[in-house]
C-alpha cells in the first residue's frame, strides 16, 4: 500500500500542474524545464503525506480512440508510436478519396480566458498522446506505450515502478493490476488488487472503488525490450493486441 499510495499522490500532483500549465509549447508561460526543475519537483514531492490522501492544486514553478505501435529491428533501432482519433471517428471529417478521418484533439482546449491552453488559432491543444521510451547511456533499452486517455501517464508510471523497483519483467509489469486516478481523491482499481491494500488506502483517505469488469478503463500496454541477443515483446490482454516477430 505504501508504494501505491505514493504513486497515486505523485500522479495527482503531476495532473494538477498539467491541467494548469501544459498547452502548446509556444503558448506556455511556464516552460517544461521549469516544471521538471529538480528543486521544484522536490518541493512538490514534500507535499505528499505518506499517511493521508490529499487533493492537490497546481504549484508555482520557478520562473525561467487510440492505437499504439512499437517496432524494433536487428540494428537496434526502436520506434515508439501512438495515434488517436478519439470519440469513435475523430472530428468526423474525412479526407476525400482516402477514408482517413481527421483528428479532434482540438477538444482538448479550454475556454478559460488567459489559460495557456485557451483555444486560439495556430495553437496545439493539450492532449494525452504519450509514446514512451527508455534509454541507458544514450542507447535504446525499451520502447513502450499504453492506450487509454489520462490513463497513459499513470500506466507508464505503474509499469516502470514494477520493473525498476520490484524487478518484474515486461509482461509481468503489463499484467499487474492497475489503479486509475479519476478526480480529486477518487481512485478506481482493477478487481485483482488485494483487499488489504484497498482497505489501507481507504484508511489514508482515498475514495476507492473497484471496477471488476471494466478493463478498458485501465488502458492497454505494449512493450519492446532490448536484450543482448535480441528483443523481448510483451502485450496486454485487456484489449486486442499482439506481439509479432519475424
Image (spheres, rainbow, N blue to C red):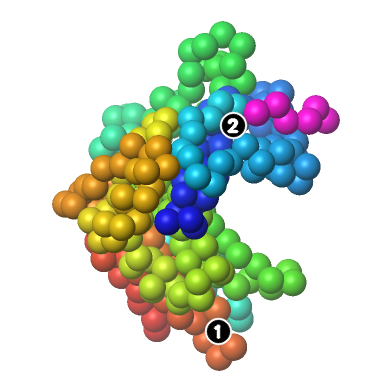
At horizontal 35% and vertical 77% (from top left) the residue drawn is: 244
Q: Is residue 233 left or right of residue 141?
A: left
Q: Secondary structure at mark 1?
A: strand
Front in this rendered view, residue 84 or 213 = 213
Tell me residue 72's x, y (percent). Answer: 51, 73
Dot 1 crowding, Cα within 10 Å, few <14, some 14–19, many 20+: few
Residue denoted by label 2: 17
Front in this rendered view, residue 56 or 80 = 56
Q: Secondary structure at mark 2?
A: helix
Is label 1 or label 2 in front? 2
Task: Tell me the quadrant of the picture where the C terminus can be found.
Answer: bottom left
In the displayed image of the protein, which residue is found farthest to the bottom? 229
Residue denoted by label 1: 227
* Above or below, 66 relative to 74: above
Q: Earlier in the sequence, mark 1 or mark 2?
A: 2
At horizontal 52% and vertical 63% (from top left) the residue drawn is: 160
* Above or below, 195 relative to 151: below
Q: Find the magenta span and give its range.
A: 59-64
How far is the residue under mark 1 from the one under mark 2?
36 Å
Within the image, what quadrant is residue 28 found in? top right
Residue 55: tell me if it is visible.
Answer: yes
Q: Tag on residue 194?
A: none
Is residue 233 found inside the magenta-colored segment of the image?
A: no
Dot 2 crowding, Cα within 10 Å, few <14, some 14–19, many 20+: some
At horizontal 29% and vertical 61% (from top left) the residue drawn is: 194
Tell me residue 238's x, y (percent). Answer: 26, 60
Secondary structure mostly seen in magenta is loop
At horizontal 64% and vertical 43% (from top left) the residue drawn is: 45
Residue 102: tell me if it is visible.
Answer: no
Q: Is residue 124 left or right of residue 213?
A: right
Front in this rendered view, residue 68 or 215 = 215
Amino acid at each position: 500500500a505504501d508504494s501505491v499510495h505514493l504513486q497515486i499522490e505523485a500522479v495527482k500532483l503531476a495532473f494538477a500542474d498539467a491541467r494548469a500549465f501544459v498547452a502548446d509549447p509556444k503558448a506556455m508561460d511556464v516552460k517544461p524545464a521549469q516544471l521538471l526543475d529538480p528543486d521544484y519537483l522536490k518541493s512538490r514531492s514534500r507535499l505528499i503525506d505518506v499517511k493521508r490522501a490529499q487533493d492537490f492544486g497546481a504549484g508555482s514553478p520557478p520562473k525561467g480512440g487510440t492505437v499504439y505501435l512499437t517496432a524494433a529491428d536487428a540494428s537496434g533501432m526502436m520506434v515508439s508510436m501512438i495515434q488517436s482519433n478519439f470519440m469513435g471517428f475523430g472530428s468526423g471529417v474525412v479526407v476525400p478519396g482516402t477514408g482517413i478521418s481527421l483528428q479532434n484533439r482540438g477538444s482538448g482546449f479550454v475556454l478559460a480566458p488567459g489559460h495557456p491552453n485557451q483555444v486560439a488559432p495556430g495553437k496545439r491543444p493539450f492532449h494525452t498522446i504519450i509514446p514512451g521510451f527508455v534509454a541507458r547511456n544514450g542507447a535504446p533499452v525499451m520502447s513502450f506505450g499504453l492506450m487509454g486517455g489520462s490513463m497513459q501517464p499513470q500506466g507508464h508510471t505503474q509499469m516502470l515502478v514494477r520493473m525498476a523497483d520490484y524487478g518484474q519483467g515486461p509482461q509481468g509489469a503489463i499484467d499487474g493490476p492497475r489503479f486509475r486516478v479519476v478526480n480529486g481523491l477518487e481512485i478506481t482499481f482493477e478487481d485483482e488488487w488485494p483487499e488489504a491494500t484497498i482497505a489501507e488506502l481507504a484508511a489514508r483517505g482515498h475514495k476507492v472503488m473497484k471496477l471488476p469488469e471494466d478493463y478498458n478503463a485501465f488502458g492497454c500496454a505494449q512493450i519492446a525490450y532490448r536484450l543482448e541477443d535480441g528483443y523481448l515483446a510483451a502485450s496486454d490482454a485487456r484489449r486486442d493486441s499482439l506481439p509479432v516477430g519475424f
